[in-house]
Image (tube, rainbow, N blue to C red):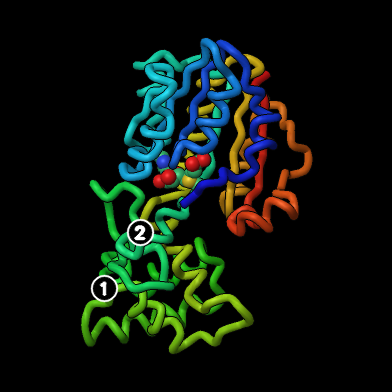
Amino acid sequence: MDHIPVLLEEVSDYLKPEPNKLFIDGTVGLGGHAYALMSRALPGSRLLGIDRDDSNLAIAKERLASFGESVVLVHDSYANVKKYAYDLGFTSAGAILLDLGFSSVHVDDPLRGFSFASDGPLDMRYDRSRGLTAETIINDWTIEELARIFRQFGEELQAQRIAVAIARAREEHRISTTVELAKVIESVVKRHGKIHPATKVFQALRIAVNDELGELARALPDLVDLLAPDGRIAIITFHSLEDRLVKRFFNARNDLQVLTKRVVVASQEEVRKNRRARSAKLRVASRL
Ligand SMILES: C[S@@+](CC[C@H](N)C(=O)[O-])C[C@H]1O[C@@H](n2cnc3c(N)ncnc32)[C@H](O)[C@@H]1O
């Protein structure tokens, strides 16, 4: 479980929880950051929390129950944030947070299909109520399409070879589980050090299934529109493609001042306690 929210003290320092502030947490997850921010921001503050994953939202709901009506939770993508912000009165937010990607609950549950460490269906959707699964992509997309996402979203150098191996394997029968897919990849890619040869392909699939880069690119302008003057937006990313997108977006906007001249990363102490923090990068900007 994501008991420990990543870069919590750094996020809190930048987002300055204080009374009477409106917060938007676009990836409320298990409610870890939201809980800490709201505890430090009482009284008078409110938080709109959004998540695509209904089981994570249920955990957040419990964790944030003590804040009563000051916390509103919504099951949707943060890319649709504007609609809810208008309806629920969060149009002048003092602080916005995105803590992107998956949570450890996703990886720990084999039925979600995010991990090849234990066998499960190739799903990988954060929102299981809609959308394409990884199984559909692996079995129905062309070799060219597969190679493109492996290259583009996984930065996988063997993208073409892996795509061809998948196409060959699926001629026998549909590839329907995580371990089956990992074995196909292992048959053509050698292991380098500790990293499993399927790691990059699994990242690529997750990004494609959830259109992670598209959602982020669509949401960023809307999130900035929702910021009050001097309001701050903090984004934690876990791979270079997302980080690059955020960095470029912040730099390109005349109405934003970048507060993290150098990207913020987790301390050695935090990484020791929480391995997932090792690849976290935080960027923060303030609305002029
Ligand atoms: C790293 S976790 C967030 C953890 C949270 N900050 C905490 O402290 O508990 C990322 C969350 O983002 C959610 N998510 C991913 N893409 C999303 C999207 N487009 N819209 C809303 N939620 C999304 C995932 O379901 C997951 O719960």
x, y percent for residue 143: 36, 75
Q: Residues within 10 Å of mark 2 (few under 14, many from 20)?
A: many
163 lies above or below 8? below
Residue type indicated by callout 2 = Met
Quadrant of residue 241 in the image? bottom right
Q: Residue at x 61, y 34 (%)?
A: 234
- Along the line of sight, the residue nearer the viewer: 164 or 21: 21
83 shown above or below 78: above
Name the quarter showing ligand 1: top left
The amino acid type of the residue labelled 1 equals Ser
Q: How many marks?
A: 2
- Residue at horizontal 21%, vertical 82%? 173
Q: Are marks 1 and 2 in contact (CB under 8 Å)?
A: no
Identity of the residue drawn at 51% across and 69% down: 200
Crowd tier of the residue under label 1, counting other residues whose Cα lies within 10 Å: few below 14, some 14–19, many 20 or above: some
Compared with 89, 149 (above or below) is below
Residue at image position (37%, 43%) is 56
| Residue 144 placement: quadrant | bottom left
Using the rendered image of the protein, determine whether residue 248 is visible from the camera's viewpoint. no
Q: Quadrant of the C terminus?
A: top right
The percent coordinates of residue 178 (x first, y second) are: 35, 72
Q: As drawn, which residue projects farthest toward the left?
A: 173
Residue 176 is marked as 1
In the foreground, 95 or 275: 275
Q: Earlier in the sequence, mark 1 or mark 2?
A: 2
Residue 225 image point, x, y percent: 52, 22
Rounded to the nearest whole Å, what is the CA distance between mark 1 and mark 2? Answer: 12 Å
What SS does tag 1 mark?
A: loop
Q: Residue 124: give its label.
A: 2
In terms of secondary structure, where does tag 2 sit? loop
Give x and y (percent) for residue 152.
Answer: 51, 63
Residue 17 appears in the rendering = yes
